[in-house]
Image (tube, grey):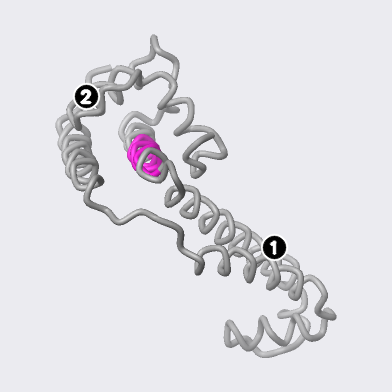
Amino acid sequence: MKVDNQLAKRARDQAERLGQQLARLDGLPMGPCPNLAQISAQAAALQAALESLPEEMAAGLMSAELGFMPGKAATAALPGHGRDWQGRLRRLAQGADAVQEWLGPDGTAAYRAFLIRGYLRGFAHMWREATQAEADPAPASEFFDFAAGWLAHAGVTEDPAPLLRAALASDWRIGSA
């Protein structure tokens, strides 16, 4: 498959942005941040508090949050909305934990890994949009060559195979995984 000009331009822009962010990384202040641990703990506590609300109160909270009139429709929408709340809070806690990890003793390396993974996920998304095909991280695939080329353009010298596997994994936010 030939990569079209629009995809190549978007990928080049992203690769150049990644290269700039990696170049600035050495100047970032890294160190522990107690607020992140507090955010993670409070998100977990809020999850527990939401789970313990009686259905009527949870429906009222959802109505107040969304501006819906309390009643049968709000109560019917509650299970789905409750899952959304739980999911957002879980991701918030995971994100705070991941940033805490980046800021730890190996902070720069972990943050660098996260940046690269995020851009690789962006390359995969662009690939899916442009080709209507899944982004295959296998070393013999067209997507692999595409992503590896743009990583090299950004100045990333590591082996792209493990970077792509980690970027497309479900726990991609955790820098040391």
> Which image quadrant: the N terminus?
top left
Magenta region, residue range:
111-121
| Residue 162, placed above or below residue 120 | above
Q: Look at 75% across and 67% down and name the residue there.
A: 79
Residue nearer the viewer, 121 or 157: 157
Point out residue 136 in the picture as x, y percentages from the top left corner.
Answer: 44, 22
| Magenta span contains residue 118 | yes
Which label's residue is closer to the chain start, 1 or 2?
1
Q: Look at 85% across and 80% down and name the residue there.
A: 54
> Is disc 1 placed on a helix, strand or loop?
helix
> Is disc 2 placed on a helix, strand or loop?
helix
Which label belongs to residue 122? none
Residue type highlighted by circle 1? Arg
Residue type highlighted by circle 2? Ala
Point out residue 140 in the picture as x, y percentages from the top left corner.
Answer: 39, 9
Q: Look at 22% across and 51% down and name the residue there.
A: 27
Point out residue 135 in the picture as x, y percentages from the top left corner.
Answer: 42, 27
Q: Is the Cβ of the residue at disc 1 closer than 8 Å to that at disc 2?
A: no
- The quadrant holding residue 91 is bottom right
Query: Residues under labels 1 and 2: Cα distance?
Result: 40 Å
Nearer mark to the viewer, of 1 and 2: 2
The residue indicated by pointer 2 is 152
- The quadrant holding residue 73 is bottom right
| Magenta span contains residue 106 | no
Which label belongs to residue 83? 1
**Principal secondary structure, stretch drawn in magenta:** helix
Q: In this view, does 31 lie to the left or right of 74?
A: left
> Which image quadrant: the C terminus?
top right
| Residue 175, placed above or below residue 31 | above
Q: In this view, does 151 lie to the left or right of 100?
A: left
Q: Look at 57% across and 54% down and name the residue there.
A: 94
The image shows a total of numbered marks equal to: 2
